[in-house]
Image: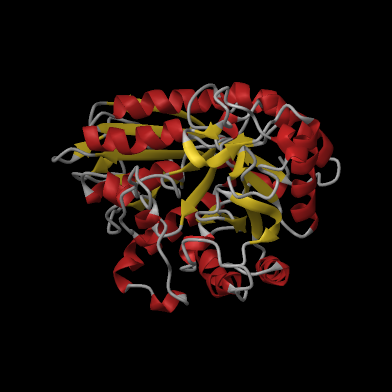
Amino acid sequence: MTSWQEHAIWWHIYPLGFTGAEPVALPPGAPVRHRLRRLEAWLDYAVRLGCSGLQLGPIFAAETHGYDTLDHFRIDPRLGDDADFDHLVAAAGARGLRIVLDGVFNHVGRGHPLFGDPAHAHWFVPDGDGGHRTFEGHHGLVTLNHGHPDVLDHVVRVLDHWLARGASGWRLDAAYAMPAAFWREALARVRPLHPQAWFGGEVIHGDYAAYVAGSGLDSVTQYELWKALWSSLNDGNFFELAWALKRHDALLETFVPLTFVGNHDVTRLATRLDDGRHLGHALAVLFTVAGLPSVYYGDEQGLRGVKEDRPGGDDAIRPAYPDRPEELDPAGSPVYRLHQRLIGLRRRHPWLVRARTSVPHLTNTAVALESAGAGRVLTLLNVDDEPYRFPLEAAGLAVADASDERATAADPCFVPAHGWKILTLA
């Protein structure tokens, strides 16, 4: 990876929700809504948070939620137009922020102009019953035929178009549903044109390393670690976290995973956790183990929301933000400051992106994670009702951050009930 990719920390935004856009496409002839411009007011907020780029959800013309694309070459009129995109790229770049776009290439919306056109029948896959294959049973999402060169040519043109216009990379939606070989062919044509671009794929289950190796992608989403984080905290079972981190560590032989504790498709961390005191534990792990961390908007304010499997079931986790940061509820400030502190620690130790993490001490309710590389970081987590003293050697280490900001160096390995500490070389 290039230097900027190696040290990326993303603020992940779902623009249609963030800007309060209409839930369905605008009628023909309706004036364009220039909502992308609203994001400019939040760029300094992202910089203060410590992020180095924006990972945007879908921004292309679509029927409803953005994943039912109608035109990959047109900004959704609910969000703006090309000029609004160019303005956002320039404003972000002036602050040192990169922009990664969400590419939905596994499927398109049923209203796509090529669907139903006999001249483009080869773009889509028959289902054997007189219809067409859809994405995971969603009638409105028609699967593209990734075995046809016309589809490959189209995707290559889209990737190139927006990278040439100022995007720095792509998050490829539902990559797990697409042949890895498709991406290998596409990237072989795009990378020579944009050698600095980054490509990450959404992969939920399966062999992450094999998919990266077969596809040529730079990274894929680390859902296994995401699940282990909140699950181990809720169950008081750090053996699950230790096992997931062992597997996570092995992935570094192939690639650096895209890590997160929340995104646009899952219940909010603040809701998922049974005990709100454990929010900092999850963040402490996110920012002290290897990976490319991503913060989903709203998580940095401690927002709550449940993902439901029904029409509109994503609305609670894709809310509108106010026009400006100063209009946020002040109740979220402590969580924002916690993110700032931990992201700051991460940036002071940039080698953590490829750190190898071992587990020098482990019980059900207490775990020590030692991340090593060009330095040493020790993360201590305790979810028990009683304080815990870790039987570890901490010579040369000092408390860099803790759940109790009054923590002193008197006994760095002593962690209060439901507390955490991060120790670094003094």
**Residue at image coords 33%, 66%:** 332
Q: Percent from the top left, x then y, of residue 301? A: 37, 62
357 or 375: nearer the eye? Answer: 357
Q: Percent from the top left, x then y, of residue 238? A: 29, 29
Q: Percent from the top left, x then y, of residue 171? A: 61, 45
Above-or-below relation of 377 to 298: above
**Residue at image coords 23%, 51%:** 276
* Colour convention of the picture: secondary structure
Above-or-below relation of 323 to 69: below
**Residue at image coords 58%, 47%:** 109
231 or 397: nearer the eye? Answer: 231
Above-or-below relation of 122 to 295: above
**Residue at image coords 57%, 67%:** 27
333 or 91: nearer the eye? Answer: 91
Q: How many marks?
A: 0
404 or 176: nearer the eye? Answer: 176
Looking at the image, the residue that sits furthest to the left is 385
In which quadrant of the rendered image does the N terminus lie? top right
* Residue 137 in view here: yes
Looking at the image, the residue that sits furthest to the right is 192
* Residue 410 in view here: no
Tell me if 83 is positioned left or right of 338 in this view.
Answer: right
Locate residue 258: give its quadrant.
top right
Tell me if 84 is positioned left or right of 16 in this view.
Answer: right
